[in-house]
Amino acid sequence: MNFKLWGVIFAFFLFAFSTSEAGAHHGSKKEMVDRGKYLVSIAGCNDCHTPFKMGPKGPHPDMSRMLSGHPEKLKMPPAPQLPPGPWVWIGAGTNTAFAGPWGISYTPNLTPHKTGLADWTEEMFIKAIRTGKHLGVGRPIMPPMPWPAYSQMTDSDLKAVFAFLRSIPPIANQPPPYAPPKKK
Ligand code: HEC
């Protein structure tokens, strides 16, 4: 056997190994995205991050704007002052803007567009959900984002949710920033 033949045999094994590796990786990635899709559907992310529209059976998430957050075109007027009593917070009909003792919060765009989570890393996402801090490091994440519940997800579930959010259609939409309560 000459060196050339060894070279061919070596190249063949290298090729077989690399394609089987790639195949295995591809399968697990799809499984992760599918699990993330399932988790997002049962965790109710669409109930706040997808704007509601009115239908014959009442308001429901408009999936043509899936997870794109509070619509930038929907400029909210100043929140009405509630009289003293048990009613303390109010929400927009889209279920994407909320005013209460914490100020006014708007659901961010979770799609992989630059106005959404395009620049986020998986690490930032996991840190934000686990710690309840904006971008994983900043101010507290405000109500009604149920991060304390989601912080109980396993690492692999949070990674799956992030993988799914990476896989959905990017939508250009820049929701307004959080507005803290006005000082009295
Ligand atoms: C009950 C409404 C509600 C639900 C349900 C909800 N969110 Fe949110 N989410 C919000 C609001 C409001 C904000 C903005 C909070 C703020 O600006 O402090 C937010 C913020 C976020 C942020 C940005 C955090 C940051 O760093 O500022 C991410 C990421 C997020 N949500 C992901 C999710 C995911 C994933 C799900 C489902 C597993 C989900 N949300 C379900 C209301 C909700």
Image (cartoon, rainbow, N blue to C red):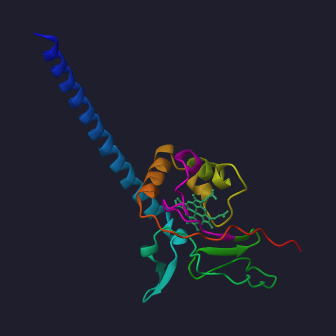
Please indicate whether residue 121 sits to the left or right of residue 9 in the image. right
Does residue 168 sit above or below 136 in this rendering? Answer: below
Nearest the eye: 158 or 88: 158
Please indicate whether residue 150 sits to the left or right of residue 63 in the image. right
Does residue 134 sit above or below 176 in this rendering? Answer: above
Nearest the eye: 88 or 25: 25
147 inside magenta stretch:
no
Quadrant of the rendering where the C terminus is positioned: bottom right
Does residue 74 sit above or below 108 in this rendering? Answer: below
Q: Residue furthest right?
A: 184
Q: Quadrant of ligand 1?
A: bottom right
Percent across and percent down for residue 15 are 22, 30
Q: Which residue sits at x=18%, y=26%? A: 12
- Count of labels in the image: 0
Q: Which residues are magenta?
A: 105-125
Percent across and percent down for residue 93 are 58, 82
Q: Residue furthest top?
A: 1
Percent across and percent down for residue 137 are 68, 49
Please indicate whether residue 88 sits to the left or right of residue 122 in the image. right
Q: Residue furthest left?
A: 1
Quadrant of the rendering where the N terminus is positioned: top left
Percent across and percent down for residue 160 are 44, 50
122 inside magenta stretch:
yes
Does residue 145 sit above or below 96 in this rendering? Answer: above
Q: Which residue sits at x=54%, y=58%? A: 117
Please indicate whether residue 76 sits to the left or right of residue 20 in the image. right
Q: Quadrant of residue 79 in the image?
A: bottom right
Nearest the eye: 10 or 97: 10
Q: Quadrant of residue 56 in the image?
A: bottom left
Q: Which residue sits at x=13%, y=16%? A: 5
| Secondary structure predominantly adopted by residues drawn in magenta | loop
